[in-house]
Image (spheres, rainbow, N blue to C red):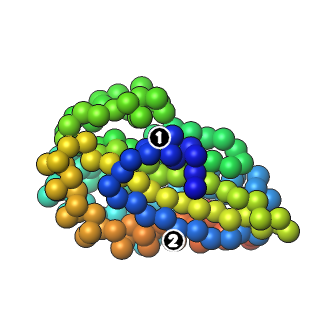
Amino acid sequence: MSEALNSLLPEYEFTEHHTTVVLGTPEQVFASVEAMDLSDSRIARTLMRLWRIPAKLVMKNVSDRNMSVDDFLPLICTPPTDLVRGLIGGSNSPKDKATVDAAAFRAFNQPGCIKLAWAFWLTDLGDNRVRVDTETRVLCTDKKTLRGFTVYWYIIRPWSGLIRLRLLASIKRHTETGSKA
């Protein structure tokens, strides 16, 4: 369990968790976690294009470009154990994303929005093995948003999970072989 994630989003309606074991030191694995990028994966790019179809049905101002890791706000980074990024989306989301730090993310509660926290935490298993956990949590700030997002979540959840599994595989490959994350 990630204390960093719990500190940012202790209550949530939706969650997804995945894990893998990587050969390397915590520092090596953490560097791979920091270097990952959604845009490097053909599957992620394709799924992001498909993601926009249901997203436009339940959210306003959905971009026509694919998301990247840079679209997520850096909220907590404590090498070599925790990295948490976040996203606030919806009609009342903050206009200036640069002003959203961990405290602002925690406190945000404007209706018509979702708060998404995406965490990675590492556990040193010894013998040059590190367990990497990733968990995504989503909180809707009102009942109307919850109703719309529930439909959206059940459409995209399997594909979102596939992207996260691919990211974990990429982190493992990058750490163990030195190829791009």
Q: Which residue is mark 2?
A: 165
Pick whichever of labels 2 and 1 is earlier in the sequence.
1
Name the quadrant containing residue 154.
bottom left
Assign the N terminus to one quadrant of the image: bottom right
Asked where in the image residue 88 lies, by quadrant, the reply is: top left
Q: What number is the disc on residue 129?
A: none
Dot 1: element: helix
Which residue lies most toward the right here?
A: 127
Please state, as top left, top right, bottom left or bottom right, where the C terminus lies in the image.
bottom right
Q: Which numbered disc, 2 or 1, marks the residue closer to the eye?
A: 1
In the rendered structure, are the residues bearing label 2 and label 1 in contact, judged by CB atoms less than 8 Å apart?
no
Assess disc 1: are there few (<14), some (14-19) or many (≥20) residues with their C-alpha within 10 Å of its C-alpha.
many
Q: CA distance from mark 2 to mark 1?
A: 23 Å
The amino acid type, in three-letter code, at marker 2 is: Leu
Q: Which type of secondary structure does the marked residue at label 2 adopt? A: helix
Horizontally, is 91 left or right of 181 in the view? left
Location of mark 1 (residue): 8
Occupied quadrant, residue 16:
bottom left
Q: Nearer the viewer, residue 43 or 74?
A: 74
Residue 65 at x, y = what percent? Answer: 32, 53
From the viewer's perspective, tell me whether residue 98 is left or right of residue 157. right
x, y percent for residue 147 = 16, 56
